Image (cartoon, rainbow, N blue to C red):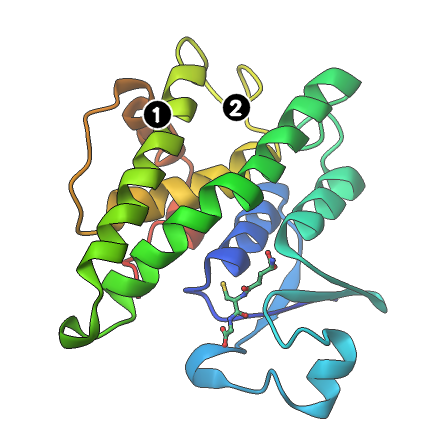
Amino acid sequence: MLKIWGRKNSINVQKVMWAVAELGLPHTRIDAGGQFGSLRDVEYLARNPNALIPTIDDGGFILWESNAIVRYFADKHGAGTLWPADLRVRADADRWMDWQATTVQPPMRPVFMGLIRTPPEKRDMAAIEASRIEAEGVWRIFDAYMKGRTFVTGTSLTMGDIPVGCYLHRWYGLPIERPKLANLEAYYARLGERPAFRTHVMMPLT
Ligand SMILES: N[C@@H](CCC(=O)N[C@@H](CS)C(=O)NCC(=O)O)C(=O)O
C-alpha cells in the first residue's frame, strides 16, 4: 500500500493528496511534521534527509519533493488525464509546476508565515506587504494567462493545475488586500467544484 508522510495542513502535502484523490489511489497517510514532529527521527531521515514533508513510499520506492511526486503519480496512473498524452501539452503543464516552485512560492511564503504562523506582535508588516505586492504581480501574470482557459493546459485538469491551484487557495485564504482578477477568481471557483480539491486543499489556513 502506498504510504504518504505529512500533515494535512502542509501545502506540499496537499498537492500530493489532491493528486492521489483525483487518481483514486488507495493509500495510507501518516501524520508527520509540524505538531506531529518525527522528521528528525533516524527512520524518517533515512527516507528524506531534508527532514521535510511530503515523502512517499510506493512499494519500496521512496520519493520526496511534492511536484516530483505529483509528476510521478500522473505518469504512473494518469495517462491522458493528469499526465497529458501530447508532449507539448505535458511540457506546458510541467512549466507551470516549475513556475509555482520558482516564482509563486518565494513571495507567498513570507506573507503566509508572517500572517498565519507569526504572532501579531512579532510580525514585520513592511516585509509582509512588500511580499504581498510581489505576489500580486505574479498572480496578475497568471490571471492574464488564464483568460479564455478552463484549466492550465486547456479544457481538462492536468498535473499543471495542482501546484498553482494549491497556492491560489492560499492567496484567497490570506487576510490581505487583493485586486479583483476575474480569470483567477473564475478558475479558483472551478477548482472548488472538484471534490478532491475541496477535501484536501480547501481548508482554513493554519
Ligand atoms: N520543496 C519541498 C518543500 C517541502 C517543505 O518545505 N515542506 C514543509 C511543509 S509545507 C515542511 O516539511 N515543514 C516542516 C514541518 O512541517 O515540520 C517540496 O515541495 O516537497
- Give the percent coordinates (x, y) of residue 83: 71, 31
Q: Residue at x 74, y 87 (%)?
A: 43
Q: Amino acid at mark 1?
A: Arg
Ligand 1 within 8 A of label 1's CB?
no
| In the displayed structure image, the side of residue 119 where residue 3 appears, left or right | right
- Give the percent coordinates (x, y) of residue 57: 76, 67
Above or below, 158 relative to 108: above
Circle nearer the N terminus (2, 1): 1
Find numbered disc 1 in the image and state the secondary structure of the residue it sits on: helix
Q: Quadrant of residue 194?
A: top left
| In the displayed structure image, the side of residue 166 where residue 65 appears, left or right | right
Q: Residue at x 35, y 36 (%)?
A: 192
Above or below, 179 relative to 77: above
| Residue topped by disc 1 | 140
Ligand 1 within 8 A of label 2's CB?
no
| Residue topped by disc 2 | 152
Above or below, 135 relative to 28: above
Q: Quadrant of residue 96?
A: top right
Q: Residue at x 71, y 25 (%)?
A: 90
